[in-house]
Amino acid sequence: MATEGSNQESRPAWKPGKRDAIFFAVIAAVILLLVLGTSERKTKPVPVDAVHQQATTRAACMSCHDADGVKPRPVGHTQADQCFQCHVQPEGWQGVMKK
Ligand code: HEC
Ligand code: HEC
């Protein structure tokens, strides 16, 4: 490079162009989505009571939270098995839930 060794002033000044603006807009949008996404994931915690501390299988949970249980999950609720991935596990929970 011809300019090698000369100081920074010989470089053309950086002017933000349209591409830079688009780039920053995309980054800002991604950050915003991530921030909003984490708050969306705060679902209701599992109640801390004897019933919930002693339910240690998915089947136990579903005996009450199935469509015809005492407290059905909302329509369109995920079929995912890991309840505690989204609903905070109750304090003093008495099991190691695998399913
Ligand atoms: C014996 C029935 C029964 C079993 C078993 C049971 N639940 Fe519940 N659950 C309820 C009832 C009734 C409510 C609503 C009243 C309350 O808040 O206690 C409820 C409420 C909830 C709520 C919502 C709390 C709210 O704020 O609306 C979640 C989440 C939940 N249960 C998850 C679970 C999970 C996960 C399991 C298994 C580990 C489970 N439940 C087992 C009866 C049960
Ligand atoms: C992928 C995340 C996710 C998983 C896994 C999940 N849930 Fe939920 N659940 C939600 C969301 C979101 C809601 C909507 C209400 C809220 O904000 O809690 C909900 C609502 C509920 C409610 C109704 C709460 C109310 O307000 O009346 C119950 C009961 C419930 N879930 C039980 C379960 C059980 C039992 C399991 C495991 C078999 C489970 N959920 C797994 C995300 C999840």
Image (cartoon, grey):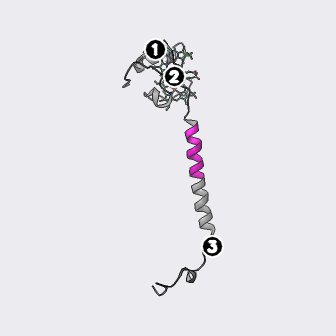
Residue drawn at the location 58% of the way across and 38% of the way down? 39
Q: Secondary structure at mark 1?
A: helix
Q: For the residues labelled 1 and 2, say whether their Cβ atoms are less than 8 Å apart.
A: no
x, y (%) of residue 88?
A: 50, 27
Q: Is the stretch drawn in magenta largely helix, strand or loop?
A: helix
Of 8 and 38, the residue lying toward us: 8
In screen coordinates, is 42 left or right of 61? right
Task: Identify the mark nearer the N-term, 3 or 1.
Answer: 3
Dot 1 crowding, Cα within 10 Å, few <14, some 14–19, many 20+: some
Name above or below for residue 21 compared with residue 80. Answer: below
Residue annotated with mark 2: 46
Of 64 and 54, the residue lying toward us: 54
Residue 22 falls in image quadrant: bottom right
Residue drawn at the location 39% of the way across and 19% of the way down? 57
x, y (%) of residue 91?
A: 47, 22
Residue annotated with mark 3: 15
The residues bearing labels 1 and 2 have C-alpha atoms spaced at a distance of 15 Å
Amino acid type, callout 2: Val
Residue annotated with mark 1: 63
Q: Secondary structure at mark 2?
A: loop
Which residues are the magenta region?
29-39
Residue drawn at the location 58% of the way across and 61% of the way down? 23
Q: For the residues labelled 3 and 1, say whether their Cβ atoms are less than 8 Å apart.
A: no
Of the 4 image quadrants, the one containing the C terminus is top left
Task: Identify the mark nearer the N-term, 1 or 2.
Answer: 2
